[in-house]
Image (cartoon, rainbow, N blue to C red):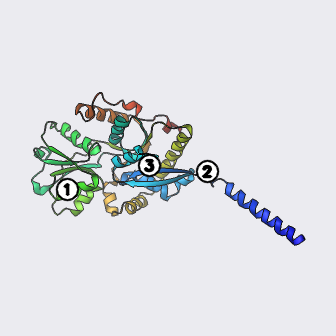
Amino acid sequence: MKIVSVVAFLVVLAASSWWLIEEQPSPHGLAETSVKVAVSLTPLSTPFFIAQEQGFFAKHGLDVEIMPCKGGVKCAHLLQEDKVDYATASETVALFNRYHHSNVSILSSFVRSSNDLKLLALEANNISKLSDLAGKKVGIVKSSSSEFYFDLLLITHALQDLQVERVYIQPDELVAALLSYQVDAISIWEPYGYRATLVSASPLINLGTEGVYQLSFNLLSKSVRGEGRKEQDRLLLLALSDAIEWIEANPDDSIDLISQELGILPQQVNWAWNDYVFELTNDYSLLSNLQLQARWASERNILEGDPVDVRALVDYQLLGTVD
């Protein structure tokens, strides 16, 4: 009887211990929340891959699944289809989504660059300056920073009436279109610009102007969110803040990691790395940039009607809760 009693006691003890283990919170005191983020495959998205690799998401109680996509337009599309909880995209993509769906909010910018966009042409086509594009075909990613950058260049050089044929192409197809002479120039972001210089048999000319446009990459979400979701937003930004601090302290390791994630050489990332400013911010420059683009889209009849009220696009309260 004693043996039976002891065995029974051990069984109960083991069951109790298992239950206690199962009910324990995560090491950081939080039950992990599953989150899906559509992340554009560009070095601009480095903080997300760093946060995943270094365990910063888990540190803040988040189980994040990164869903890679080629360009912010596709990332935002996944958000609209409710296949993800968040998406990364330029402010231009956020603006267009706000116009068409009225349900997108910028939670925070996490990186800026004044030299990420390029307007590339083949030297063999005898195109050496912007005005040489008259009557030519220009490859553009529709409703993205690619299109805004091209128009901004024309306006800056007083060439807004220049007659060109816009050819709308997917981001990953632009380089091939240029090298196969389907278009005479392409407006594209990195790492596609550097990739084009590697594979082109003919030298490339950058018709763009550094500093004419400051691209921001942003974390987007649906604008209608409950209180629990807002806490999730805050934790996600905290993880990104940790990642940005790590990037600042470990730039070489960051370049190696994002190179592996994108399947490109570290030299490709290093080529534009110094142009990136990683920082969580919703400052005035973002609002000013959005206002400029809203007027541009309205005046060119890309978006019909009055310009989008961009003040409703940016969530100014959330970032203030992130210390």
Instruction: Inspect this view and state whether residue 33 appears.
Output: yes
210 or 180: nearer the viewer: 180
* Left or right for 14, reference 103: right
Residue at image location 41% in from the left, 31% down from the top: 312
Residue at image location 30% in from the left, 45% down from the top: 114
Residue 306, compared with residue 28, is above or below; it is: above
Per the image, the residue denoted by label 1 is 177
Where residue 161 sits: x, y (%)?
Answer: 14, 36
**Badge 1 or badge 2: first in the primary sequence:** 2
Q: Residues within 10 Å of mark 3 (few under 14, many from 20)?
A: some
* Left or right for 99, reference 160: right
Give me the disc on residue 83: 3
Quarter of the figure that contains the N terminus: bottom right
Residue type at mark 1 is Ala
Q: Residues within 10 Å of mark 1 (few under 14, many from 20)?
A: some
Considering the numbered disc 2 on the image, is that residue within a helix, a strand or a loop? Answer: loop
Q: Residues within 10 Å of mark 2 (few under 14, many from 20)?
A: some
Residue 58, compared with residue 214, is above or below; it is: below
Considering the numbered disc 1 on the image, is that residue within a helix, a strand or a loop? Answer: helix
Residue at image location 13% in from the left, 39% down from the top: 162
Where residue 277 sits: x, y (%)?
Answer: 38, 47
Q: In front of the other: label 1 or label 3?
A: 3
Where residue 266 sits: x, y (%)?
Answer: 35, 62
Where residue 117 sits: x, y (%)?
Answer: 27, 48
Residue type at mark 2 is Ala
Quarter of the figure that contains the C terminus: top right
Per the image, the residue denoted by label 2 is 31
Residue 155, compared with residue 201, is above or below; it is: above
Instruction: Inspect this view and state whether residue 247 appears.
Output: no
How far apart marks 1 and 3 lie (CA) works out to: 30 Å
Considering the numbered disc 3 on the image, is that residue within a helix, a strand or a loop? Answer: loop
How far apart marks 3 and 2 lie (CA) works out to: 22 Å
